[in-house]
Amino acid sequence: MLVHPNFDPVALHLGPLTVRWYGLMYLCGFLAGSYVGRWRIKTQPWLKWNVDEVDQFLTYVVFGVILGGRLGYVLFYKPEYYFSHPLEIIALWQGGMSFHGGFLGVTVGSILFARKTHRRWLDVTDFVAPLVTFGLGFGRLGNFINGELPGRPTSLPWGMVFPNTDLMARHPSQLYEATLEGLVLGTILIVASRHQKPTGVLSSYFLMGYGLFRFLVEFTREPDNFLGLLSLGLSMGQWLSIPMIVVGVILWRTSLKSAMIKA
């Protein structure tokens, strides 16, 4: 049995300014996405992107993640509470972000950027798909450092006690997600992107991959205590992941069929 190190959530004190590990993880995710984007435009000339466009688009992504992630948490998880305490909606420092909300925020940002640059929307989402996975991975590391979102109780040898939760050995589900949604999915998408694919295929890989990995990891993740398990014994995260998988499969089939017709 392992014990969580119970890290100090504050990484640095710079006078009156405190820098939290969670914020640093977001920064690492942004830098990793920027690096992967630059690598893609150097090695994949068919993309027809430039460095300035990568930087501009990542700005859209950052705002999409923050605004969408927060609003998603408010609407999907605690609508009654936040409608009764509207001023707390902007209290990001108290925690509370939703991946599925952040995903919708990035989707809106992609639409706006596509219109601005006169690109097809799926061309933009195909470009960003490999970039965002590392942000997901670093975000889950931030959850682990904070000791938040622990897993369900387990008797496995790598079960970990999170002292801020209780004294039960639990799945380190944050690390499962960081590995699957960040490292594994990111590697799959980067390898797949090395050769030109029909428009929409990389986006479909992301939807299917993230949806499947998140659905599976949710079996080891402790449900939110204010929600618990929903219909069919599934969590909110699982119910929100199912549409991603379905849309991903439809997009994959449609993209391949469209490419065959054009050929």
Image (tube, grey):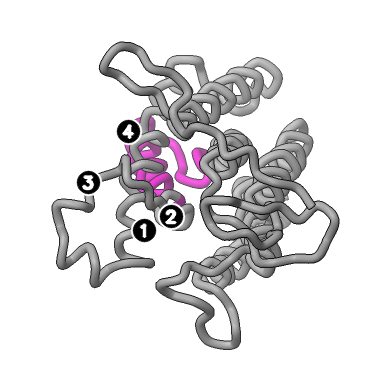
Question: Quick one: 42 or 100, which is closer to the camera?
Answer: 100
Amino acid, disc 3: Ile
Against 210, is 196 above or below? Answer: above
**Distance Cα–Cα, label 1 vs label 2:** 5 Å
Which mark, by number, is residue 116? 4
Q: Which residues are magenta?
A: 103-126
Residue at label 3? Answer: 90
- Whichever of callouts 4 and 2 sits on the residue coming sooner in the sequence is 2
Residue at label 1? Answer: 73
Amino acid, disc 1: Tyr
Tell me what residue is drawn at x 46 percent, y 57 percent: 100
- Whichever of callouts 1 and 2 sits on the residue coming sooner in the sequence is 1
Which SS class for mark 4?
helix
Residue at label 2? Answer: 98
Q: Are marks 4 and 2 in contact (CB under 8 Å)?
A: no
- The chief SS type of the magenta part is helix
**Distance Cα–Cα, label 3 vs label 2:** 14 Å
31 sits left or right of 173 in the view: left
Question: Quick one: 253 or 217, which is closer to the camera?
Answer: 217
In front of the other: label 3 or label 4? 3
Task: Tell me, yes or no, if residue 120 can be seen here.
Answer: yes
Tell me what residue is drawn at x 36 percent, y 41 percent: 66
